[in-house]
Amino acid sequence: MQAILALEDGRVFRGKGFGAPAECSGEVVFNTALTGYQEIFTDPSYAGQIVVLTNPQIGNYGTTPSDDEGNRPYIEGLVTREFSPVSSNWRSTQVTDEYLEKYNVPVIADVDTRAIVRHLRNNGVMRGVISTRETDVDKLVERARAVRKMDGTDLASVVSTKERYEFSDRDPRNETGDKFLPQALAPGSKQMHVVAYDFGIKQNILRMLARENCRVTVVPAQTSAEDVLALNPDGVFFSNGPGDPEPLEYAQQNVRDLAGKTPLFGICLGHQIFGLALGGKTYKLKFGHHGANHPIKNLDTGKVEITSQNHNYAVDSESLDAGAVAVTHVNLNDQTVAGLKHKKHPMFSVQYHPEASPGPHDSHYLFKDFRAMMEDFQK
């Protein structure tokens, strides 16, 4: 079937349709990761976005439930150069075409993704529409212009869990169903209780916390700090998630209410929330950071980490109170703030995904740092 991608500035791309025979709209972004397309599909941070994958071959190893990072795909639509209708991998349980059709996600393939990416890099992310039904491009461009902008929109509450739950340490990636083996602990060490705010949390974050011998209670985005403290946590985690951090005033207030009372760790949207809660400002990047090979310099150690990233906003370093907050990591591509820590309270955050999935494992140490922070706080 025919498919059309129309952008709000009037640029139009024609291709072949896969997935669901439908129409979708959203903010168009690109991701440069070479593998892990299913993890990208199911990352709640992509809610409200159409994703262009720069790897030219997508779908060739199929899908499996154990690679889901959320309970369903959160991307609005997919754009790719080549989309495979068949899969070749022993782990695959469903071809990608059927998987996306099941969840009503349209795909446009056989388009020049290089041209689309260059257009977005030159002009910035923009709203768009994918349709396998409408052939009038003028109508599609008008629909793209009518798409609600992500700026000022609280998407975290939309994708967050509605009920509190305990995370099971049974690893769905382990085909045998065995439980995680926790990391070796020092004599006298105990299991830590972490309360995790779900703004769109990825499953591998929960797995990494479990690996550090943490019992994890996941709570809805708008849970009050008072209710979190009533759960007697050893530490509180603020997760990744979609959209603009500024509307999340409730989350910013929770950071201020929890600071100094328990150790805090934030990733991506959680990092941006920390920055705002500590008096800083955020701004929207021209085309965001989406990929699995972004170099980050740890200013404390001088080492460079290759990281997985997915965000459209960043913390303004000039807006931070240098007397209270230290920048710990910097993105070497554009010098944006990639990590923060409070100089008095036990709290730190990073603007990337140390749990990866997909991506490298260079930053797994941050989960160990969080556990060490919780242990030190109890001394």
Image (spheres, rainbow, N blue to C red):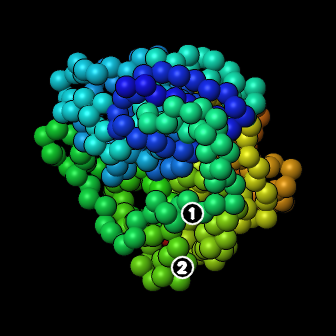
Estimate how packed mark 2 is, as few (under 14), some (14 to 19) or many (20 or more) residues with alpha carbons within 10 Å: some
Q: Please, which residue is most extreme toward the left here?
A: 176
Query: Residue 19, can we see it?
Result: yes
Q: Residue at x 68, y 21 (%)?
A: 118
Q: Earlier in the sequence, mark 2 or mark 1?
A: 2
Kind of residue at badge 2: Ser
The residue beneath circle 2 is 224
User: What amino acid is at disc 1?
Assistant: Leu
Q: Quadrant of the N terminus?
A: top left
**Label ID, residue 264:** 1
Is the Cβ of the residue at disc 2 closer than 8 Å to that at disc 1?
A: no
Instruction: Mark yes or no: residue 308 visible.
Output: no
- Residue 95 is situated, as x and y percent measured from the top left of the image, at 25, 29
* Residue 65 relative to residue 229: left or right: left
Instruction: Give the distance between the C-alpha atoms of the residues marked 2 and 1, in whole angstroms.
Output: 15 Å
Name the mark nearer the viewer: 2 or 1: 2
Given residues 250 and 103, the one toward you in this image is 103
